[in-house]
Image: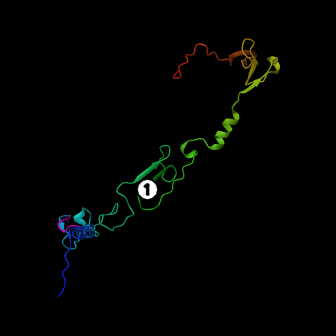
Amino acid sequence: MATKKVLGLTGLQTFYTKIKTLVAGYVPTTRKVNNKALSADITLSASDVGATAASHTHNYAGSSSAGGAANSVASSLTVKLNSGTTEGTNMFTFNGSAAKSINVTPAAIGAATSADIAAAVAALNAVKITIVSSLPAVGSAQANTIYFVPSSGGSGDSYDEYMLVSGAFEKIGNTSVDLMNVPDDPEY
């Protein structure tokens, strides 16, 4: 006669835990996706998820039908250089019928070229700063030069500043800085 095996409480609990672990990753058949039950395989359409069908098309710009010619636009684009009026020179119209290249040069828009800027900088009278122990004679002084002469009333790094103006030296400032009345406040 065959012997029957019966699970005890511990065996039954172990069996229940193993079954529970095995089915933990499965989706219940009562769950729905887009109102379709998962009791069998489902198929979603584009409209189920708010998408357009693969056959959906649009008209090209300037065309009255889908897939029509794309060589024109509803509104042309016009680029004018300095209020230009001559097509191809200072006015360029794009209507989609062909590629359009526009070469914008400084001269075309009234801007200075790099050569113009270099010439203007070269023409400037640059100011030089020269430290001397005393002012030179007016006749030998250089134009556009600020002469730093040690200040008689300041510390060793304080200078009076002079420049030749209309044939005579003019004191234009001093390099000393008085910080005696400046508050100690770091926010100042």
Tell me the amino acid under the disc marked 1.
Answer: Phe
The location of residue 106, given as percent across then percent down, is 57, 45
Give whichever of 149, 127 is nearer the camera.
Answer: 149
Q: Name the chief secondary structure element in magenta.
A: loop
Residue 127 spot, x, y in % from top left: 71, 27
Quadrant position of residue 68: bottom left
Q: Nearer the viewer, residue 75 or 130?
A: 130
Instruction: Tell me where the magenta segment starts and ends, as one range.
Output: 27-32
- Mark 1 is surrounded, within 10 Å at the Cα level, by few (under 14), some (14 to 19) or many (20 or more) other residues, namely some
Tell me the residue at 53%/22% (across/down): 186
Image spot of residue 133 (x, y percent)? 80, 19
Q: Residue at x 68, y 38 (%)?
A: 119
What residue does disc 1 label? 94
Question: Residue furthest toward the bottom?
Answer: 1
Q: Is residue 46 above or below residue 115?
A: below
User: Nearest the camera: 87 or 61?
Assistant: 61
Identify the element where label 1 is drawn: strand
x and y percentages locating residue 37 in the rendered image: 17, 68
Furthest toward the top, the residue is 153
